[in-house]
Amino acid sequence: MCCALGTMKTLIHITAATEHISYVPQLSSATLGGRLTQSTFTLEQPRGQFSHPSISDSDAIWLVVAHSNATQKFMAPQKVEDTPVPADFPQGGYYLTLRASRALYPGGQPSNQLWVLRVGNDTRCSPRTRGCNHPLPGPGPYRVKFLVMSDRGPTAETEWSSETRLQQAEVLQAAPGPQTAGTVVIIAILSVLLAILLAALLTLLIFTWYDTCGSTPISGPGELVFVRKYDTHHMSRPSAVGAS
């Protein structure tokens, strides 16, 4: 009982020590190309949101990515070593990624620059690596927030964003009604044409075979003919008589 009370007091103390930042993460402008894909979405950078004196330049600012139904059970890790990774996402429902510092999110935004964070954009890192920005595994919905952590644990956090759903691949379906009948007619015509072509090809092969078998073979110029030489007696020349 004493241990349970001690643990509860510790959790209450941690919760009270975490500063609340009234900032809601937002998707980037709707005109931005690739704002939503099948495995990524793009956020506006939280510029100028971490200037509170309790946050130091060395504190890590993480982006928490969670399934929409897992935000209620989210518990901020107390040490960097306990940071959940993308490989924990299917079971735990959330993970931390895109580690930064407040120096990367200064206040004021030049009008000629675009400052965004693309979530799920790194295909090269291992999902078991801490901070990996691995592609998102499905359409969602997802919700995100920013969490500030120091060596002592979490120090500040923002609001959760609204739900974000990714694009889904379109499934091609057979067109109903007359289009289906037209497709059947086209397939039937192509089948008939293919049958005619095969029949013509078979006829040509049979004609060629009969023409080859019915012809008389003729020796070519390369064939040699051997003739045996005979020396007959009655064709012999008589020997000379009375040579002087």
Image (cartoon, rainbow, N blue to C red):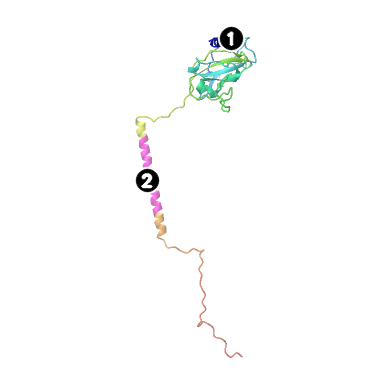
Q: Is residue 9 left or right of residue 180?
A: right
Of the numbered discs 1 and 2, the one sitting upstream in the chain is: 1
- Helix, strand or loop at disc 2? helix
In the image, what residue occupies the spot 38% across and 49% down? 200
Query: CA–CA distance between discs 1 and 2?
Result: 84 Å
Closer to us: 180 or 83: 83
Give the amino acid type for the residue marked by disc 1 in the picture.
Ala
* Residue carrying label 1: 17
Closer to us: 60 or 207: 60
Can you tell which mark lies on residue 196?
2
Callout 1 touching callout 2 (CB < 8 Å): no
- Helix, strand or loop at disc 1? helix
Residue 151: % across, % down: 63, 15
Residue 46 visible within the image: no
In the image, what residue occupies the spot 40% across and 52% down? 204
Q: The magenta stretch spans which residues? A: 183-206
Callout count: 2
In the image, what residue occupies the spot 58% across and 9% down? 17
Label 1 vs label 2, nearer the camera: 1
Assess whether residue 78 is covered by the magenta stretch: no
Residue 54 sits above or below residue 66 on the image: above
